[in-house]
Image (tube, helix red, strand yellow):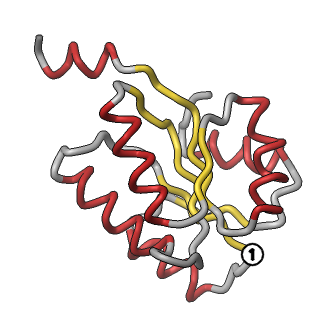
C-alpha cells in the first residue's frame, strides 16, 4: 500500500485541546463538542503523546489548541517538538494554535517562533470568533 493510500485511510478526528486549567477545558470543550472535539490534555507532554497515539491508531487531528503556560512541557516546547516530528514526516502536518489569556505581543511572537499557526485568546466564549479564525486558516470542519 502506498503512503498516499495509507493517509487516505486514516480517520481524521476533529481537535486536541490542551490546557492545564480544568475550568478552561470545560468551557472550551462545551463549545467545541458541537464540532466533534475528540481529546483533551493537561500539558504539552500529554499533547505529544495524544498526537502520536492517534497517529499510531490510524487517526489524525485537524487542529491542536495549545495553552502556552503549562506544567511538565509548556505549549511552546510541545509545539517545537511536534513541528519537528511533522517536518521530518514522522507525523502529519497539523495546525497548532496558541490558546492563551496572555495576548501580549511578546507571547504572540513566541508562539510564531515556536511554529504555532495562530493565536486564540481566552476567555473562549464566542464560538463565532473561533469559527472565523478557522475560516481564515482554511480549516474545514
Quadrant into which the N terminus falls = top left
Determine which residue is flagged by label 1.
101
Q: Position of residue 64 (x, y in %)?
A: 53, 50
| Residue at image point 58% right, 40% down | 15
Residue shown at the point (75%, 39%) measured from the top left: 32
Image: 38 above or below 128: above
Left or right of residue 26: residue 61? left
For the C terminus, the image quarter is: top right
Check the image and report above or below for 140 versus 25. Answer: above
Number of other residues with Cα within 10 Å of mark 1, as a class: few under 14, some 14 to 19, many 20 or more = some
Q: Depth check: give the residue in front, 74 or 137.
A: 74
Disc 1, SS: loop
Q: In the rendered picture of this protein, how many numbered marks are placed on residues?
A: 1
Classify residue 9 by image quadrant.
top left
The residue lying toward the viewer, choosing from 57 and 81, is: 57
Which residue is outermost to the right? 125
Vertical relation: 81 (above or below) 72 = above
At 35% across and 28% down in the image, what residue appears? 57
Q: Position of residue 2 (x, y in %)?
A: 11, 15
Residue beneath the point at 63% across and 39% down? 135
**Camera-side residue: 39 or 92?**
39
Residue 120 on image: x %, y %: 68, 62
**Residue 91 placement, left or right of 36:** left
Q: Going by the image, does 120 lie left or right of 80?
A: right
Rendered location of residue 77, percent (x, y): 39, 74
Amino acid at each position: 500500500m502506498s503512503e498516499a493510500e495509507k493517509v487516505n485511510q486514516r480517520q481524521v478526528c476533529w481537535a486536541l485541546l490542551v490546557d492545564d486549567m480544568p475550568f478552561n477545558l470545560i468551557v472550551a470543550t462545551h463549545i467545541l463538542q458541537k464540532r466533534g472535539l475528540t481529546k483533551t490534555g493537561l500539558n504539552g507532554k500529554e499533547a505529544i503523546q495524544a498526537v502520536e497515539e492517534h497517529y499510531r491508531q490510524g487517526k489524525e487531528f485537524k487542529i491542536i489548541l495549545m495553552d502556552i503556560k503549562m506544567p511538565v512541557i509548556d505549549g511552546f516546547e510541545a509545539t517545537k517538538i511536534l513541528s519537528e516530528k511533522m517536518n521530518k514526516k514522522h507525523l502529519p502536518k497539523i495546525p497548532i494554535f496558541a490558546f492563551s489569556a496572555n495576548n501580549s505581543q511578546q507571547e504572540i511572537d513566541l508562539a510564531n517562533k515556536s511554529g504555532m499557526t495562530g493565536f486564540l485568546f481566552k476567555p473562549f466564549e464566542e464560538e463565532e470568533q473561533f469559527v472565523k479564525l478557522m475560516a481564515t486558516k482554511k480549516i474545514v470542519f
